[in-house]
Amino acid sequence: MTTTTSATVTTVTPGTPRLPLPATAGSDPAGVATHCAYCGLQCAMTLTGSSAADLAVAPRRFPTNRGGLCQKGWTSAELLRTPARLTTPLLRRDGELAPASWDEALDVVADAIVRTQAAYGRDAVAVFGGGGLTNEKAYQLGKFARVALRTSQVDYNGRWCMSSAAAAGIRCFGLDRGLPFPVTDIGSAHAVLLLGANPAETMPPFLTHLVRAADAGGLMVADPRLTPTAAKALDGGGLHLQLRPGTDAALALGMLHVAVTEGYADRRFIAERTTGFDDLWPVAAQWLPERVERVTGVAVTTLRTAVATLARARDTERGAYVLSARGSEQHASGTDTVTAFIALALALGLPGNSGTGFGTITGQGNGQGGREHGQKADQLPGYRRIDDPAARAHVAAVWGVDPADLPGPGRSAFELLDALGTESGPRVLLVHGSNPVVSAPDARRVSDRLAALDLLVVSDFVLSETAAVADVVLPVLQWAEEEGTMTNLEGRVLRRRRALAAPAGCRSELRIWNELASRLGCSTGFPTEPRLVFDELRRASAGGPADYSAVTWERLDAGESLHWPCSPQRPQGTPRLFLDRFATPDGRARFVPVDHVGPAEPDDTAYPLVATTGRVLQHYQSGAQTRLVEELSAAAGEMFVQVHPDTASAAGLDEGALADVVSRRGRTRATVRVDEDLRPDVVFLPFHWGDDGRANSLTHAALDPTSRMPEFKACAVRLEAAQ
Ligand SMILES: Nc1nc2c(c(=O)[nH]1)N[C@H]1C(S)=C(S)[C@@H](COP(=O)(O)OP(=O)(O)OC[C@H]3O[C@@H](n4cnc5c(=O)[nH]c(N)nc54)[C@H](O)[C@@H]3O)O[C@H]1N2
Ligand SMILES: Nc1nc2c(c(=O)[nH]1)N[C@H]1C(S)=C(S)[C@@H](COP(=O)(O)OP(=O)(O)OC[C@H]3O[C@@H](n4cnc5c(=O)[nH]c(N)nc54)[C@H](O)[C@@H]3O)O[C@H]1N2
Ligand code: SF4
Ligand SMILES: [Mo]
């Protein structure tokens, strides 16, 4: 791209009212009360110090973390002082990224947007967001796409995270809030079934809520690996259901079968609070425990004990919960799988009662809020649908635009990336809060698509693998340098508070969108103060499923605990949903007839193993952030593949050897970690590294028909000794 400024580009920034700056850590000896930079548990912490160099993190007592932090939380301040921090915009000149002024960089972006849309239409410019963005940024990004760019092409990385759980929640309960109860409710339960969740590594302080269940022998973990979480279950006398990847739906239907045929079903609950049982039962009736054992590898006795344990805890009022996470959800049949587990929970009468329930564990820092306020391809703020005329009218009125000018639904995350640079696809892409070069499925294909763009613009505070291939890189603020709100895994709205001034050279994304909008000649206001954006978000969400209208910064700052929906009709918020009725038109939860499908790519003689992927304690997601933290990289510095000893020796590999894991799409180089507790037909790879250690060179993009979730958790591979 050139750096010439087009005549249509202006640099006028509409004035926005200024609010007083909040206290920073430096001015308040007691420190700044905020929440962690990373995951959806949003552990509470206090920041003290006067500059990035001496900022210190201390855990703060809060219901979700009870005073605990994981290693990532403890070391989260390191990234504020990393020498790798971006502090100046970068423009690609003669093939190299080189420093540029903000005006230069923003002019290049605005100029490309104007020229591209004039030549190829509005949808030739696309936006990709992230579930780590604050509510204000997620909301503003969706508004920027629909009102300033007037493109339908906006989606985000949450599509790869929570979309199957969300789709199943909406299908069965009429609403998607990951945990429809406070996380502390789980703490009193004597039976908890975890489906593809490894919180011992992905949310360590969450384990405090599993102690009672573990001690009672009621912690049960369905995972192909003996994870630290599964080990905890076994230590307490609980269960490890060591299923083959991608067979969770068979497990769910088998458990439902046992629940009904062995007399554990709650007939009254089914009759009074649900519909559709008779449609699903003929499918579940086929899943005799012996058949389930053949498909999943989970022994019949284990299956029976798991159901009996849940039913016993329910009957003695000791609490029973079924919780799903990415292991069971990140499949091309993820929505149906979660639907089947919800059916199990409904048959046992767990949802919609206090002391029992079904939930899904939201992953990203703002994974819940980030999926409510309009950065999703089919969505407007307040969890409204973009194809609903009433929703369009409401939101258009808040934005001061004609509803007819709002675009319709766009492409889902992978489909969007896969269309980049094609004849009918977007030619300019703006990325905010994601590193798809590492985290996208079939990432080689995605990298090729990114390379085919006319202009790739990445906003980040570090040079992620995606920023490194961009044409324009915009240095933005991080966590402790910004104000905002986040919505945690239990639908509770939290305040993120600023402890440090913005580093020289960095700008907030709210300011970037404001400046781009004015350069594009857009007359709609894009406030730059988070608090003003939040007030607008409240109005835009009013009356929608995720209604924030009665949540105010004053109430949050006063320490009130507010779970959405929180409206003038329910000013106290809603910690527990569905107690009286589900969010469906008739108030009843739905059984939906679904069947087991299995992985989209079967293994064969050329690719005889199933590769599954996931996380380790020290690294976060694509690793762009945590690989820069010395303590974390020292503890977990290299890409590895977890292999059963028999499988390793069949491939001529020993512990510590370098292996190539090969799929139909690519290869990944990794150090062999032999683990005799792993299934011999499975290998596990973390996805936190790029380059030749990128797990997503192997994965494929078979998409769930409803949620468009890719199949991150199963693909066929073989192992080779690295040459
Ligand atoms: N340390 C760390 N913590 C994180 C994150 C991180 O990157 N690092 N990311 C955050 C985010 S965004 C998310 S979404 C959460 C994810 O949190 P989790 O869902 O707990 O994490 P994963 O490791 O992706 O997957 C969980 C388990 O699923 C198992 N699994 C694989 N395939 C299958 C299968 O087919 N069926 C079943 N039942 N299990 C299977 C894996 O072996 C793994 O142990 O973590 C959050 N917390
Ligand atoms: N194989 C495999 N692939 C997976 C998964 C898996 O289990 N297996 N899990 C999937 C899941 S659940 C998820 S959530 C995705 C996550 O994968 P990504 O979408 O790549 O998520 P992150 O690594 O968190 O990327 C965030 C990037 O944004 C930057 N960033 C952080 N905060 C902000 C901000 O406020 N503004 C801006 N502009 N930038 C910011 C960070 O520095 C980082 O470079 O990966 C998915 N990919
Ligand atoms: S569990 Fe999540 S929120 Fe808590 S300290 Fe660790 S990364 Fe941060
Ligand atoms: Mo995620």
Image (tube, grey):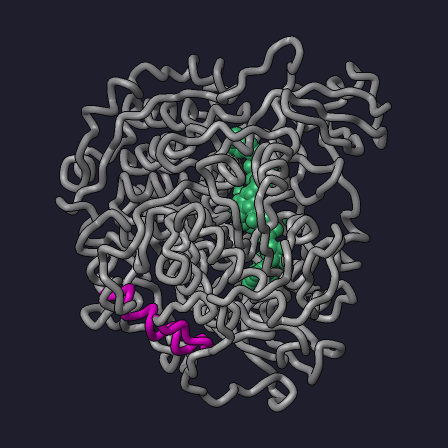
Is 567 left, or right, of 338 in this rendering? left
Q: Which residues are magenta?
A: 524-542
**Quadrant of the rendering where the N terminus is positioned:** bottom right
What is the quadrant of residue 268 in the picture? top left
As rendered, which of 637 and 526 lies closer to the eye? 526
What is the quadrant of residue 51 in the picture? bottom right
Q: Residue at x 22, y 37 (%)?
A: 590
Q: Residue at x 55, y 32 (%)?
A: 713
**Quadrant of the rendering where the C terminus is positioned:** top right
Residue 558 sits above or below residue 701 on the image: below
SS majority, magenta: helix
Is 48 left, or right, of 32 in this rendering? right
Residue 387: x and y in percent read 25, 47
Residue 530 falls inside the magenta stretch: yes
As rendered, which of 715 and 290 lies closer to the eye? 715
Residue 105 falls inside the magenta stretch: no
Residue occupying the far top of the picture: 605
Residue 609: x and y in percent read 64, 19
Q: Residue at x 59, y 45 (%)?
A: 436
Ligand 1 quadrant? top right
Residue 218: x and y in percent read 47, 41
